[in-house]
Image (cartoon, rainbow, N blue to C red):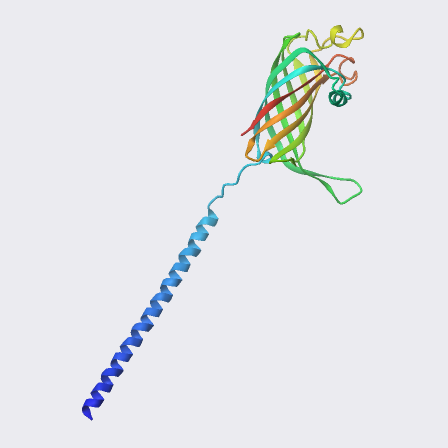
Amino acid sequence: MLGTRQVSLHFLAVLLLTCSMGVCSLRSSARAAELGQADVVAARAIEARQPVSVPKTAGDRLFYATVYGDIWAHTDLLTLPLDAVKGILRTDRVYFVGVGLGYTLVPSFSVPMPFCACGINGLRLEVEGQFGSYFGLQDHLESALVLLLRSPQFPLLAGFSVNVAIGEGVSYAYSLPNFEGSVAAEGLDAAGPRKFLNYLAYEMEFSHEQVKNWHLLLNVRHRSGIWGVIAPHKTGANYIGGGIRADF
């Protein structure tokens, strides 16, 4: 009888020890899980505080630099697009090579449209200074300062996109042009060249999603007296060409 009680007590002691060890193991596992979960939460919190690198788009730029190349076009500004489409646009041996440095004044704004609850979004306002030289039938230095209104990006095919811009400013030739405003350029009613004229800029800027900081341009440069406001009619010129632009 005494032996049976001793065996029972021994079995009960082993059972209690096993249970206590299991409880401790469960508590340790739960504690480890809590610590692991806490580490995950802490890591996520650290990641959330770190800046995330986001690829730039054309609309994110602050400064940009451009190289231009243009040629004289024998046409009026209003008929230039139609003449180009018809293939009757005449040019002459007056060439311009220049550089431009631009700055984004307003990176994005909207213009409400009348008579509806809609608007044009993603417009940009930029300012650009240009400096260049002519060669060919005229040879002088020229600078321009222009304020540009740029459209949002319009998607094309194969990752390409385009925006358009129109600019208003002033242009100054450092010496009187030899060809611009002359009889050879404007005919018998030419008013003669002028140093200071109004300046209009038109351009299409093409981009690709793989190289968003580089762009190809098609542009028109227009110098004029604003129909006699600051200089006589037929004193200016139109130049067509293109360029390459880098954002930074």
- The image quarter containing residue 135 is top right
- What residue occupies the far bottom of the structure in this picture? 1
For residue 130, above or below residue 194? below
- State the residue in front, 126 or 6: 6
For residue 110, above or below residue 242? below
- For the N terminus, which image quadrant? bottom left
- State the residue in front, 234 or 175: 234
- The image quarter containing residue 219 is top right
Residue 222 drawn at (x, y percent): 71, 19
For residue 95, above or below residue 160? above
Q: In this view, does 30 lie to the left or right of 127?
A: left
How many numbered marks are there?
Answer: 0
Q: Is residue 45 left or right of residue 88?
A: left
Residue at image location 78% in from the left, 8% down from the top: 187
Residue 47 drawn at (x, y percent): 45, 49
Residue at image location 76% in from the left, 6% down from the top: 183
Residue 102 drawn at (x, y percent): 60, 26
Q: In this view, does 168 lie to the left or right of 100?
A: right
- State the residue in front, 71 or 99: 71
Q: Is residue 29 left or right of residue 149?
A: left
- State the residue in front, 236 or 226: 236
- The image quarter containing residue 207 is top right
Residue 20 drawn at (x, y percent): 30, 75
